[in-house]
Amino acid sequence: QVQLVESGGGLVQAGGSLRLSCAASGSIFSDNVMGWYRQAPGKQRELVATVTSDGYTNYADSVKGRFTISRDFAKNTVYLQMSSLKPEDTAVYYCNAEWSHDYVGYDYWGQGTQVTVSS
């Protein structure tokens, strides 16, 4: 069983910054993708950013240039550095890890952390 624990959410003013952390534990396959997703009330959960086990990154257009995803392999932790925050970034942010092995897919989620950006 894999556990993902997020931290770092909070209330910030527009233009401010936050760094989210996700600590992973358990039996995680070496070839994996970790990422951040977010969900606002009444809306679908959406991709924010992903990073592969060899460091390739992908970002939603809405956060490109403002957010940075990174991994600390020694600590088994993924981060999301958020800058120039906008009220539209307000959501619950979830950490995700996924991979496939022998044609079986695996998908794990953290509990979520609230980010609120005031105008």
Image: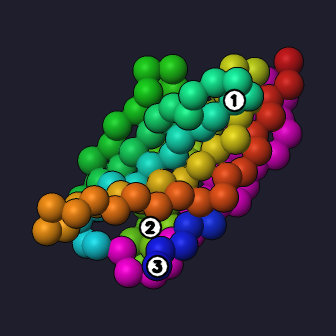
Q: Secondary structure at mark 3?
A: loop
Q: Secondary structure at mark 2?
A: strand
Whichever of callouts 1 and 2 sits on the residue coming sooner in the sequence is 1
Expressed as whole percent of the image width and height from the top left, the position of residue 76 reads 45, 73
Residue drawn where x is 51% and y is 46% of the image: 36
- Residue contact between numbered discs 3 and 2, judged by CB atoms under 8 Å: no
In which quadrant of the rendered view does residue 53 lie? bottom left
Check disc 3 and give the amino acid type: Gln
Residue drawn where x is 85% and y is 39% of the image: 11
> 76 and 33: which one is in front?
33
Does residue 65 appear to the left or right of 114 in the view shown? left
Residue drawn where x is 19% and y is 67% of the image: 101
> CA gap, disc 3 to disc 2?
21 Å
Task: Answer whether residue 32 is magenta in the image.
Answer: no
Label number found at residue 40: 1
Label number found at residue 72: 2
> CA gap, disc 1 to disc 2?
28 Å
Q: Secondary structure at mark 1?
A: loop
Whichever of callouts 3 and 2 sits on the residue coming sooner in the sequence is 3
The residue lying furthest to the left in this view is 102
**Magenta stretch: helix, strand or loop mostly:** strand
Residue 38 visible in the current orientation: yes
Q: Which residues are magenta?
A: 6-28
Q: Is residue 24 above or below residue 80?
A: below
Expressed as whole percent of the image width and height from the top left, the position of residue 26 reads 45, 81
Residue depth check, mark 3 versus mark 2: number of the one nearer the observer: 3
Label number found at residue 1: 3
Structural crowding at the residue carrying mark 2, measured as other residues with C-alpha within 10 Å and reported as few (<14), some (14–19) or many (≥20): few
